[in-house]
Image (cartoon, rainbow, N blue to C red):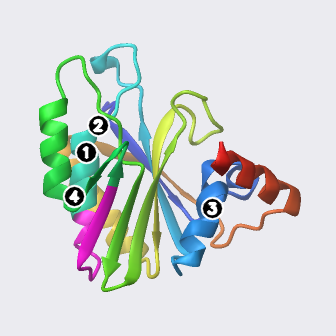
Amino acid sequence: MSHNTIKLIWGYLPTVDDRSFAAAFLPIAAQAGLTQRVAVVFDTYRPDKGPDMYFDWALLLALLRQALSLLQWESISIDQDEKRFNSLEELTRFYETWAGPDLDPNPPRTIRVMAGNQAVGLMITEDYTGSGGPAPYHDSLTFSFYLKHLDPSQFRESCRIACVEQGATISEEITGVPVLRISMWRKLVNMLRRMF
């Protein structure tokens, strides 16, 4: 059994995502017109990598290459801590020079994909490694993809190809609701979360 697994969450989980990072970043995606979401949940526990949380950057890069092949795009902006990259090649070189046997680089915080001056994709990292987080996000690095048009079968296939390349598997798929309804109180809490 492979411990290198991902989960796919289509849309939002109403009793979970209204309190999660997804709700906090939803206005950013909605403002760009990116209303469809799929979350790719990376399990950070890997017995073969020791007791610490593990970020599989090679799997993320494989997934990003596959996902980008589904979009008509012209430019990409990748925010990585204090650095900004304008291509996956730049991010790959950064990871290859950073990574070592005992070093784990951080995942990108956001990735914006543009066609001209219009956003066609946004990826936001939701880091649950330090806080546990609710199931199915518990102790994960979750990469939420916000898109204008999402074909689940194509996205699933792109994830499957990336997993095969990197020796990973899709362990679970969960279908949520397409639109997340958030109470005013929760919106206030989420706004404060983004600020701090």
Judging depth in this view, the residue of 34 and 13 nearest the camera is: 34
Q: Secondary structure at mark 2?
A: loop
Q: Is residue 20 above or below residue 23?
A: above
Distance between the alpha carbons at the discs numbered 3 and 1: 23 Å
What is the tally of numbered marks visible in this picture?
4
**Residue 120 covered by magenta stretch:** no
Decide: marks 2, 1 in contact (CB < 8 A)?
yes
- The residue type indicated by label 4 comes to Ile
Asked whether, in this view, residue 180 is left or right of residue 107, the answer is right
Asked whether, in this view, residue 11 is left or right of residue 161, the answer is right
Nearer-N-terminus badge (3/1): 3
Nearer-N-terminus badge (4/1): 1
Q: Which mark is residue 59?
A: 1
The x and y percentages for residue 40 are 43, 52
Asked whether, in this view, residue 138 is left or right of residue 54, the answer is right
Judging depth in this view, the residue of 70 and 101 nearest the camera is: 101
Residue labelled with disc 2: 56
Q: Which mark is residue 12?
A: 3
Circle 3: is it few (<14), some (14-19), or many (20+) Cα within 10 Å? many
Q: Is residue 104 above or below residue 72?
A: above
Q: Secondary structure at mark 3?
A: loop
Judging depth in this view, the residue of 124 and 158 nearest the camera is: 124
Q: Residue at x 35, y 24 (%)?
A: 46
Can I make out residue 165 in this image? no
Q: Is residue 80 above or below residue 123?
A: above
Circle 1: is it few (<14), some (14-19), or many (20+) Cα within 10 Å? many
Nearer-N-terminus badge (4/3): 3
Residue labelled with disc 4: 161
Distance between the alpha carbons at the discs numbered 2 and 3: 24 Å
Specify start and end residues of the magenta stretch as a single range. Answer: 66-78
Decide: marks 3, 1 in contact (CB < 8 A)?
no
